[in-house]
Image (cartoon, rainbow, N blue to C red):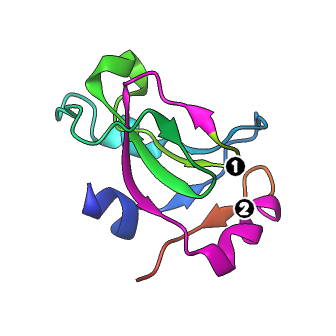
Amino acid sequence: MKKIVLEEPHFNRGDVNDYLLRSTMSRVKYKGQGFPVFNAPKMIKRGDIVIESDNFGHYAGELNIAKRDMVNTGRSNVVGHVVEEEVFLLDKIKPWQKFEFTL
């Protein structure tokens, strides 16, 4: 999961929604690799970095960033969080725009 977050290229899909920034290339590259549920809190908070589990079907391995708080269906693993002083940047990322994570 760390490799997906830190080493893979990311871009926000063009079909934007109000809840998530979606970076989908990891689900294509890592298809069939296995993404078990291991950290699925009841709530996903704004700024949470999420990788979808195998229980999410063909979305398994997709990286998302929550733009709003939402209920977790139990299929989404929270693998990190955008630091609070940078969460405002989520509202600045446009469709098809590239982004990356740094430690």
Q: Secondary structure at mark 2?
A: helix
Residue 23 sits above or below residue 31 on the image: below
Q: Is residue 23 left or right of residue 40?
A: right
Quarter-of-image position of residue 97: bottom right
Residue located at (57% from left, 48% from top): 45
Nearest the camera: 10 or 42? 42
Q: Is residue 28 magenta?
A: no
| Residue at numbered disc 1 | 67
Q: Position of residue 10 (x, y in %)?
A: 53, 58
Q: Is residue 87 left or right of residue 74?
A: right
| Residue at numbered disc 2 | 90
Residue located at (24% from left, 32% from top): 37
Region in magenta = 70-93
Q: Are marks 1 and 2 in contact (CB under 8 Å)?
A: yes
The local crowd at label 2, few if under 14, some if 14 to 19, many if 20 or more residues have their Cα within 10 Å, is some
Nearest the camera: 58 or 68? 68
Where is the N terminus found, in terms of image quarters?
A: bottom left
Q: Position of residue 71 (x, y in %)?
A: 56, 29
Amino acid under disc 2: Leu
The local crowd at label 1, few if under 14, some if 14 to 19, many if 20 or more residues have their Cα within 10 Å, is many
